[in-house]
Image: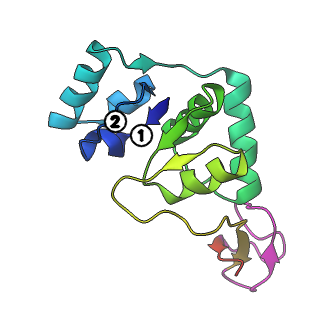
Amino acid sequence: MQVLDSSAFIHEYHTADEIASIPMVREELEGEASYRYDADEGSGMHVHIPAAGTVEKIQRAARETGDDDTLSETDVRLLAAAFELDATLVTDDYAMQNVANRVDVSVKIIAREGISETREWTFQCQGCGREFEENRDRCPICGTELARKNPA
């Protein structure tokens, strides 16, 4: 089974496998992409709503990788659906790929190149330059905002 992100409908992705998605994806789509979602739903696409516990597990994994501020609620729920259905997630979103790798969800790329490595982001103060393992609203030392930094 494959769980489809918005990009699958936008790029007219087709597969012979069973497919699933979530209602929030339909809300993101416009025009022809929304018609494709409706057509797929009408022809048997499974519309899945993941359990709250699974959503929390994905949110924890996103915090651990540092992608929590980048992922939308739709992204988190898509990841949770793919996890629950033991399915392949079809997406071009790099942050989703990073978290999917963390929770052992396989990913299929549509239009872009996929990620080549998993990253656990660090966060650096824009004022004093200190680095932190976890994201915070402001630096506890000087009060300046933090920015996500590539750990490489």
Q: Please provide percent x and percent y for residue 102.
A: 71, 51
Please identify the dominant SS of the magenta region. loop
Q: Which residue is mark 2?
A: 15
**How far, Cα to Cα, is label 1 from label 2?**
14 Å
**The disc labelled 1 sits on which kind of residue?**
Asp
User: Which span of residues is magenta-colored?
Assistant: 126-146
Q: Is residue 100 left or right of residue 1?
A: right
Q: Position of residue 28 (x, y in %)?
A: 33, 36
Q: Nearer the viewer, residue 114 or 143?
A: 114
Residue located farthest toward the left when viewing the structure as drawn: 32
User: What residue is rendered at 49% in x and 36% in y?
Assistant: 74
Q: Is residue 47 visible?
A: yes
Residue 78 versus residue 131 in the image, above or below: above
Instruction: Tell me, for residue 5, which label it has, or none.
Output: 1
Residue 92 is situated, as x and y percent measured from the top left of the image, at: 42, 54
Secondary structure state at the residue bearing disc 2? loop
Does the magenta run of residues contain 139? yes
Name the residue rendered at 73%, 61% in the picture. Answer: 135
